[in-house]
Amino acid sequence: MAKIPSPQSGQPLDVQYIAQLASAINDVAKQISPSNYKFFTIHTPARGRESIKNMESRMVAAHIVVASEKPVISGEEITFSYEFDTDFSYPPIVTATIFNSGSSVGNAASVVIKTVTTSKIDGVVKFATNGNVSVGVNMIAVGIPANG
């Protein structure tokens, strides 16, 4: 949004200046419009269903390296964790998926989220076959920030 310069004392107001004011007011009105698509709804066990403005929500996405050319055996579990850079007001909704760098061992792996707190996610990747593997976890956390 453009910043409008303050007029000088005694300066006559012209059409261009008034047009800038009107444009800035319209920009603010668009940002605070109560349209449905500008709201974010989250439903968690901790708080039930809650709707807030999109700009008041928080989304964190990360790639977590779990194993790089590591030999694994069937049934082995490797733990992972990720700390959010700022806290959520309550545990966010988190989705985690395997990112396989190409081996068939990674294709047979699964990810389980063990715990989610306001500041951290903990989980495990479990392998179903033996071999060398390079895998990571792509994680997305969505919630309401602690100071939001």
Image (tube, rainbow, N blue to C red):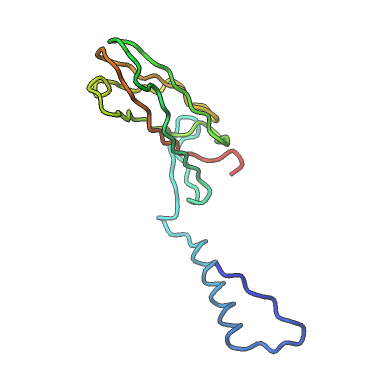
Left or right position of 24 against 114: right
Residue 77 at x, y percent in the picture: 36, 13
Residue 135 at x, y percent in the picture: 34, 25
Residue drawn 43% across the image and 29% down it: 64
Residue closest to the eye, 126 or 72: 72
Left or right position of 98 against 16: left
Left or right position of 15 against 92: right
Quick check: 53 above or below 141? below
Q: In the displayed orientation, state which residue is furthest to the right.
A: 9
Residue drawn 39% across the image and 16% down it: 78
Residue 41 occupies quadrant: top left
Residue closest to the eye, 40 or 125: 125
Residue drawn 22% across the image and 22% down it: 104
Q: In the displayed orientation, state which residue is furthest to the left.
A: 104
Residue drawn 56% across the image and 35% down it: 85
Quick check: 53 above or below 4? above
Quick check: 61 above or below 64? below
Residue 81 at x, y percent in the picture: 47, 24
Give the number of callouts: 0
Q: Where the C terminus falls, by quadrant? A: top right
